[in-house]
Amino acid sequence: MKKVFAIFAIAGLIATASCGNKTTEETVEETVVVEETVVEEAPAVDTAAAAVDTTVVAPAQ
């Protein structure tokens, strides 16, 4: 009877050991976001050019 009990005990230990906590490594993919800053330069202003009057005066009627 002791041998039968020992066999069941060993089978139980093997069964519980096979269902134990297994650590699985999760693969984490890191996404690198590159943020580009575009700087637009203002158009060059010719300071030597003649000034232009941009206001339009309507003719008197």
Image (cartoon, rainbow, N blue to C red):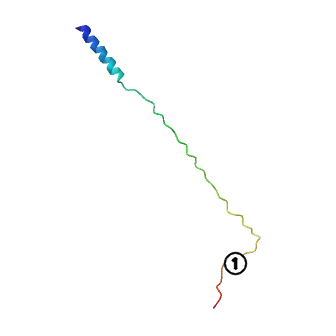
How many neighbours does mark 1 have within 10 angstroms: few (below 14), some (14-19), or many (20 or more)? Answer: few
Q: Is residue 37 left or right of residue 6?
A: right
Res. 49 image quadrant? bottom right
Residue drawn at the location 66% of the way across and 81% of the way down: 56
Give the percent coordinates (x, y) of residue 28. Answer: 48, 36
Give the percent coordinates (x, y) of residue 45. Answer: 72, 66
The quarter of the image holding the C terminus is bottom right
Mark 1 highlights which residue?
53
Q: Is residue 2 left or right of residue 59?
A: left
Tally of numbered discs = 1
Q: Is residue 12 left or right of residue 30?
A: left
The quarter of the image holding the N terminus is top left
Residue drawn at the location 40% of the way across and 26% of the way down: 22
Residue drawn at the location 55% of the way across and 45% of the way down: 33
Residue drawn at the location 25% of the way across and 10% of the way down: 4
Please name the amino acid that badge 1 sits on: Asp
Q: Mark 1 falls on what kind of element?
A: loop
Tell me if residue 40 comes above or below residue 51 in the rendering: above
Q: Is residue 61 left or right of residue 48?
A: left
Tell me if residue 12 comes above or below residue 52 in the rendering: above
> Which residue occupies the extreme bottom position in the image?
61
> Which residue occupies the extreme right position in the image?
48
Give the percent coordinates (x, y) of residue 8. Answer: 27, 14
Res. 19 image quadrant? top left
Tell me if residue 16 comes above or below residue 35 in the rendering: above
